[in-house]
Every structure is written in structure tokens, then in C-alpha cells.
Amino acid sequence: MAALCFSSQGHEWNKNDDRLLNAVEHGEVDKVTSLLGKKGVNAVKLDSEGKSALHWAAAKGQVECLGAILAHGADASVLDASGSSPLHLAAKNNHQECALKLIQQSKCVIEALDSTGKTALHHAAAIGSVPIVQLLCEHKCPVNIKDVDGCTPLLLSARHAHTEVCRSLIDHRADINTCDKNGRTAVMLASESSSLPTVEVLIQKGADLRLVDTLGHDVLHYAKLSGNAEVVNLLQAALSKLSPDCDKKTPKQLQHDQVTRLNEERGTTPKKRKAPPPPISPLQLQQIMSPISVCATSFFIGQQFAMFSRSPARKKQREIEKLQEERNMLLQTIQDLNVILNHNQAELNGNEEGNLVAVLQAKIASLSLEHQQVENILKEGSRPNSFDSNASYHSTKDDFDKSVEAHDMPAKEDEETVSEEPALGSSSTSVEQEDPGKSVKMESEEEIKVLREALQHLQFKLSESELEKKTLQAKLLPGSADVLQHSPDEVSEYVSELRDKIKETQSKYEDAMKEVLALRDEMKSEAVVSEEDKAVPNMQELKELYDSEIKHLKDKLSRALQEQERDANLIKQLESNVESMGNRLSAEECEEMKNSYSMLIENINQEKALLLEKYKEAQEENKMLQDALRGTVPVESAAKDFDDMKAEMSRTIDGLQRRLLELSHSYSEAKSELSIARNKLATCEKETGLNEQKLEEYVTKEHHDNVMLDFTQKIQKMQDSLAETEAKYREALKENTVLKEEAESEKQHSVSLSDHTQVVSSLGNAIKELEAQVDKLKEQLSQKALQIDALQKQLSEKISLQEDLVPRSTHEGLKNTLESEIKQLMLDLQEALKKQEVLNREVSQARQEVKEARNEKQTIQGIVASKDEECDELRTRCREAQELIFDLKKRVECLSSLEQDKDKKIEELTKEVVKLKDALNSLSQLSYTTGTPKRQNQQMESLQQQVKQLQFQLAESKKQHQEIVSVYRMHLLYAVQGQMDEDVQKALKQILMMCKLPAETK
């Protein structure tokens, strides 16, 4: 049996799907078309491996089968378990005709991405299929789209050295200088794979050879890693044609652009965390940080000059805050770069600890090689060609440092040493060609003596390092075999000892190398002195260039320092202005306060309009309920509508209550803002020095009378609302008890029409009461609006002081008493509202209990009906099973009778065999006594043949018997399982045939 799996449509896997897959694999088009015509067969259904018939046809290159599947309307955009579409599989396996058919017939999405972010063009470029690449480019597939690793189709084709694919992609406007996540371009990848023709094509098409990756490596670095001399020569020739000024300027700028791009990616990424970027060397960090600081200072200067052009103090304060935020952002980017460095160093340390023994052995082998090279250098120390050997030795040392500690020695030193080697070679040849004088001979002899002494010192140090190397080897060889036997503490101690010894050898080695470098620099200076006559004009030009650059940089530095001082002074001035302005309250702030209050009033008016619209809707719904109560609408529908209306009304009431709370909060905030404004006004009046101190202690009579009237009106309204809410609370308690009694009666007995109408009438009354509550809440909102208007009037009257005044102490005392009374009334109101909410919740709970009881009744009835249906089905199945058992019993009886007959035949045959054996024995005795030997032999052979035939007949009868028994067993098993498949029908036919055969023989 095939494994079951579910497709995108949710159907089960069956035998026809297996047959369809087999037909697609063998390319049987007729069988595929016939199977697709059957019911339940779907070519997009996925098997246990996660692929459908459509995906298999595209992957295997079965063009005719693919056409038949597409003709039946299969969706070509379906993805398999690995996230690949049929077009991805056709491009990956280089099936051009399948790709063409998918594009033309199905009109599939060409730019669709798989799970790795690759399009079909990525896969075609990776395998080097030129026709599929051209086909996809002609149908406007995006050429510069990047996958998860940041690779475009051009980068993949360059990595795999597909020259023609690169040419066709560039002809279709692919970006030749694009780079992946590690900053590698197509030329770098092609030179790394040592593909000379692809490098030539990319150079011809205009690839930029001056670009640098995130580690600071250029194209020549990757070419040297590949070890192909032709590629290196080609790149050097191409680089020599470029202008030297561009060679100096572009790498730093590009590196800065790459760093900014990394920062942008880090800033714009979602909350999913990405992998950290590759490690950055210290020199690169310095190059990255210097342009950032320059850009930051220039940005600060531009922003500050723009800021000073604006006069208002508030705008200046905002700009200062923006500048501080930008400064903090730059500091955060610097901290992020430091974190990345620490992270990469920790990863390197972790990797070194994991594979320490292997690294130590590699280091010892490299040290032995270096020791041999140094011995060769010492042997050739007195020769004039020793400079070249020193240069080669230094290059091997740089390569070793790169392989072991890539973060300690940057790649630019390697390039400098490589560029210095030809200069040294030329200097040594020039020294050899010149005819030295007597003075030169004397100086050279003295220098040779100094060199010999230094070389002897080096030999002594190298012998010490060789001894330590031998001791390390002697410890490592037995230690590597016994590391697993020791405990982890012993292993860690052993590793720490080895690490300390290696550090000591490395320090000694570095000291020796420093001395060698110093000697080399001395020899280099001598060679330069000998060539001074030839290179004097060049040196003068270089000096002039350097002097001009230094002057230019000094000018820039002085300007930057002056601008920085100006900025600091201006910032101090602005801060002092801001502090002085913070103590004063300007007319602009008063206008802003007025505008805010006007906005609040407009919002309240809009909310009033919304509440009026809701009130109208509630009135219409009330009319509907009244019609339902009168009998114009059916009772059940009216009850449902009433429940919905009740829920909506409760929601609106909750919204209004929330709005009331918000308005109360806004009122308290407005009061606090008023107090703040008053304080600010008082401070302003003090600072202006107006002689109105006596006037501040009094308030106008008109204002005092108005405030008193307002407060008395508010108190009366609050008391009225309190009395109304208490009455409502009592009525709600009564309704709650009534509803609870009704819910208990509904639980015990079914609801009658009279009770239902009574409930509906009571609910209608409740709705009316709720509408009354809504009206009262609206009145409260209007009162709040009046309060805000009164507060605005108070503000205007406070600003324009008049002559008629009241003592301020009495006014404040009355105000405090009234405010305390208002607070108490507000607390009473809140308690009443809370009680009302509790009652509403209890009412809703009672209604929910009634609904739940009804729902439980309905569910129980549905369960009973479903169980009755199941019982009927089981009874029918039992009957069918009894009939099958009866038939099987009959067939078993027939089989038993047949078996008895066969047993009788077998017994008869055995008796005949016994008789024949007896006859044989008797005949043998007779033949011995009477017959000739020839006749005896003939009789023996005939008897043996008869015995063999009888044995063969016995074996065949046993086989037939076993087959019959197995067929009956299969039929019984299928009957017990309740299956009626093609195999079961075949077994029944065999049984009938076997029943007919003995009847015919009889």
C-alpha cells in the first residue's frame, strides 16, 4: 500500500495517483491522459516526498506528459515541499522545452522565488544553460534580483565559470558591478575560480577592478588565491592601464559606501535577526571611522548654519535636539561596530579552542618550513642577492600570518610587500651594475660586518626556537593519542601550557622578523642612496605633491577647528536664550492655549452630533420593538431583534460612559493647564514690573457672581442626577430579581407565549429607561461643554482685569469649598455608575444563562438525532454482515466437502502407490528368478516413472489446496474489514470457478 499524503486541495492519496506518477516517470502520455480524466485524480497533488506529477514531469523532462497535464488546467505556480515551482525544476535540470512549454501554455509567474530566494534564472545561470537564460531574459525575468545570500544570476554564473551565460546576462542589462553580502563582485568570483575567459569578458564589458569587499580584499587578492598566473597577469595589465589617481581615491570611498550600506541594512531589517557580517580588520575600522567623522562634522556644521538663520527660539531649540539625536545615532553606530569586532574575535577564539590540536600541528609544520627558509637566508647572507630572498621570506611570513591569524595582519601589508619586491630587485641589480669606488667598498665592508653579527644573533635565536619546536612535537605526538583518555581539566591544562609555549615561540619569531626587517630597511636605504642621482626629479615631484596635500589638510583642519569653536559658542548662546525664554510666557503660548480649547469645543460638538445620530437610530429601533410587541412581527424574530438591539444599546451606553470618563479627565487636565497658565501669568506680571500687586489680590464682582451661580446650578443638577440614579438603581434591582425568577422558571419548564410577551414588555420598558439614561448622559455632556465655555470666559476675564474687585482670600475660600463639594458629588456619581454597571452585568448574565439553556436543548436534540442515524447505519451493516457470514458458512461447507473428497482421493492414491511398491517388489523377485537383466531394468524404469508421476500429482493437488485456502482467507479478511475492492471481486470469481470445476468433473 502506498503512503497516504494530503495535497493542496485536501484530498487523500490513492492508487490512481500512484499510477499517474509511474506513467509520468516512464513517459506514457496516453495513460497520463486517461488517468487525468478519472474522478479524484489531481496532477498537483503532492506525494510522500513532497512532489506532484507536474513537478516530476518538469524535473524529468517529460515534455509530452507536461503538455497533457497543462492541457487539463493544472496550476503551474504550485510549489513542492522544497519550495520549488515546475519552472524552477525545469531550469535546474536544464530542460529547455519544458521551460518553454510552462511559460507559453501555463503563463506561470517567471519572477517567482523558491525557499532560498532564487528565481528560475538563478538556477539556469548556476548550471550554465545559455538557451534557458536567453528565454527567461526575453520574457522579462528580473536580471538583478538577489537571493538570500545576496547573489544575482551574474554572480552565480561567474562563480561557476560560465562565460557565455555572463555575456548574455550583461547584454540583457545585468549590473556588472553588483556584489553579494560579503562585498564580492563578479570579477572577484571569476578570478577566484581561475576562469580566464570569464575574467576577460567581464573586463571587456567594463567591470570595475578597483572595488574592494568587506574585508578590504581586491581582485588581485582573489586571483592570487586561485594560483592562476594568467589571470593575475591579465588583471595587473588591466590595472596598469587605469589612472593612478583613481587607484588612490576609489578604494576608501567604496569601502565607506559598503560600510554605510551595512549600517542601512542593519537599520532597515525587521525584528528577525540576521547573521553577523564578516570580520573587519583594525585598519578598515580606522578607514571606516574617519569618513564617518568627517561626514558627521560637515553635517553638524551645515545644520547649525541653517539653524542660526532662523530667529524664533523654539525652532532653534528643536534643531538643537535634532542635532543631539543625530550625535547619539552616530555614537550608537560606533558602538555597534565595536560589538561586531568583539563578536568576530570571540568566534575566532572559539574556533581556535575547538580545533586546537590540529592548529598546533599545522603551526609546528609551518615553523619547521620557515626555519628551513631562514637557514637558506643565513647561508646566502653575504651575497648581494640576499635582498630578494629576504623579500620572498617576508612574503611567506605574511602568507603564514594570513592563514593563522587573519585579524592580526591586514591584507594591505601583503600588497605593499608585493609592490616593494620589484623595487628591491631593481635596486639590487642597480647596485650590482654600478662600479663602486673605494669609499663605497669601505662602507660596504663595515655594513657586511654588522650584517654578519646580526645574522649570528638570528641563528642563535632560531636554534632556540627549533629546540622548543622539537619539544612541542615530542609532547604533541603522544599527547594527541592520549587526549581522549584524560579528564577535561587535564586536557584544558595541557592545552593552556601548549598555548603559552606557542605564544613564546611566536614572540621570539616576531623579534627575529623585526630584526630581519630592520636589516632589510637599512639595505633598502643604501640602494636608494645609490640611485639618488637617477631619481632626484621624481623625488622632488613627489615631495611637492605631498607638501601640497599636507598644506591642504592643515587648512581643512584649521577651518574645522574654527567652525567647531563657533558652533560651541553659538550652542551656549542658544542654551542661555532657551533658559531665559523658558521662564517667560509669550503671547504665542496664550494663543496656543486658546486654540487647544477651541479644538476641544469643536470635538465635543462633533461628538454631540454623533450622539444625536445614535439617538435617532435608537428611536427607530424602539419603534421596531413596539411593532413587534403589538404583533406585527413574529414573536421569535422580535425576541432575537430585541436581544441584538439590547446588546447594541449596552455597547452605546458603555461608549457614552467611557466618553464621560474621558471628558472628566480632559476637564481635570484643562483645570491643571489653567492653573499652570495662571502661574505663568503671575510670573510674567512680576517680571514686567507693573504696579498691580494690589489688583492681584481681588477679583471682579461680576466674575464672582457668575462663578457662584454656575456652581450652585451645578450642585443642583448633580443632586437631581443623584436622586434619579438612586431611583433607577432601585428599579434595576427590582428588575434583576424579576429576571432571575424568570430565568429559573425557564430552566424548569418551557417558556409560554404569555410569559414571553410579558418579558418582551418588561424589556421594552427597560429600553425606554436606557434611552432616558442616554438623554441624561447627553445632558451631562452639554453641561460639560458649558463648563468648558465658562472656563474660557474665566480665562478671558482673567487676562483683561477690570476695576470692580472682590477680595481674593474670600474668593479662594468659596472656590475651595465648592470644589470639594463638586469632588464629593463626582465620587457619588461614579459610585452610582458603578452600581449601574454591576446591575447591567447581572442582567446580561441572566440573559446569557437563558440563551445557554436553549442552546443546550438544541444541541441535545441534534446529538439524539445523529445517534439515531448512527444506530440505523449500524443495523444495516449488521444485517449485511450476517448475510455475508451465512454465505461464507455455505461456501466453507462446500470447501470442507471438497477437501473430504480430495482426502479420499489422496488415500486411494497412497493405497495404489503401496500396491505398486508391493508389485514392484514381487516383480523384482520374479525378475531375479526368471527374467533376463534387460527386461528387469525396463520394468524398473517404467515403475519409477509411474511413481514420479504420482508424486507430481500429489504435489500439484497440495498446491491447489493451499491456494484455495489462501483465497478463502483473503475473502474472509476483506469481509470482516468491510472492504469490497477489485482484489475481493477477483477472489470471489476464483471461488466460483473452483466450485464449478468439481461439479463438472463429477
Image (cartoon, rainbow, N blue to C red):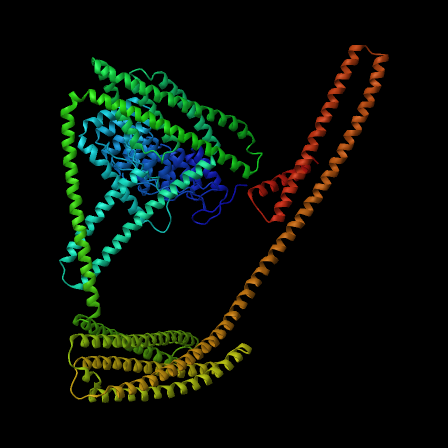
Residue 586 pos. (x, y %):
17, 71
Give percent across and percent down for residue 759. 45, 81
Relative side of 910 to 261, left or right? right
Picture quarter with the C terminus? top right
In the rendered image, the vertical position of residue 294 relative to residue 535, given as above or below: below
Across and down, in percent, residue 188 comes to 29, 31
| In the image, residue 780 above or below residue 505 | below
Q: Quadrant of the N terminus?
A: top right
On the image, the x and y values in percent for residue 158 come to 30, 31
In depth, the one of 664 and 658 nearer the eye is: 664
Q: Quadrant of residue 195?
A: top left
Which quarter of the picture shows residue 481? Answer: top right
Residue at screen point 63% across, 42% down = 970
The front one of 485 and 736 is 485
Considering only vertical position in the picture, is 610 above or below 738?
Answer: above
773 or 945: nearer the eye? Answer: 773
Residue drawn where x is 30% and y is 82% of the image = 779
